[in-house]
Image (spheres, rainbow, N blue to C red):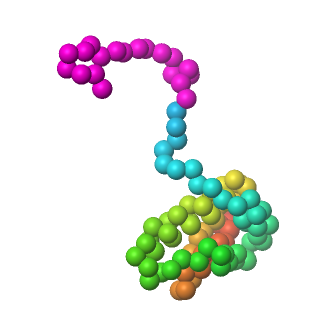
């Protein structure tokens, strides 16, 4: 930001000359997870016990959102839509969304 005694600089450029950052953080995922989601048959549920969330912890809501975002990113990378649900003991489950 320009100080009070400085004249601010402005420059007009072509939008195509600029690179923009995406909003938020890039979710990283294990390629094995994406492969498992791609191979998931309709009507079956994929459980992910290694991504268990402690539902009684103070950060459960944040952790569930983080795990869900990672799963959605993996599913998007293989071109499928999924529905994510957590069991009562915090294990995330994934099932394909089928169009009706």
Specify whether residue 3 is painted magenta. yes
Rendered-image quadrant of the C terminus? bottom right
User: Who's the residue at 43% across and 72% down the image?
Assistant: 59
Q: Is residue 54 visible?
A: yes
Identify which residue, 90 or 97, lies in the foreground: 90
Vertical placement of residue 100 versus 60, above or below: above
Vertical placement of residue 84 versus 31, above or below: below
Q: Is residue 55 left or right of residue 43?
A: left
Rendered-image quadrant of the N terminus? top left
Image quarter for residue 75?
A: bottom right
Vertical placement of residue 8 versus 88, above or below: above
Number of numbered labels in the structure image: 0
Provide the residue span drawn in magenta.
1-19
User: Who's the residue at 48% across and 15% down the image?
Assistant: 13
Q: Is residue 100 visible?
A: no
Q: Position of residue 84 (x, y in %)?
A: 59, 70
Which residue reaches farthest bottom?
88
Q: Is residue 31 left or right of residue 86?
A: right
Q: Position of residue 9 (x, y in %)?
A: 34, 15
Q: Position of residue 92 (x, y in %)?
A: 60, 75
Q: Position of residue 10 (x, y in %)?
A: 36, 15
Q: Is residue 77 left or right of residue 24?
A: right
Which secondary structure class fits the magenta region best?
A: loop
Specify whether residue 85 is painted magenta. no
User: Who's the residue at 60% across and 61% down the image?
Assistant: 70
User: Who's the residue at 43% across and 14% down the image?
Assistant: 12
């Amino acid at each position: 930001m320009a100080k009070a005694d400085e004249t601010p600089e402005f420059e007009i450029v072509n939008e195509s000359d600029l690179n923009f950052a995406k909003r938020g953080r890039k979710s990283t995922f294990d390629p094995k997870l994406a492969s498992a989601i791609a191979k998931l048959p309709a009507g079956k549920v994929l459980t992910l016990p290694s991504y268990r969330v402690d539902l009684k912890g103070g950060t459960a809501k944040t952790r569930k959102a983080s795990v869900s975002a990672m799963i959605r990113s993996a599913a998007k990378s293989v071109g499928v839509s999924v529905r994510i649900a957590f069991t009562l003991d915090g294990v995330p489950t994934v099932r394909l969304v089928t169009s009706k």
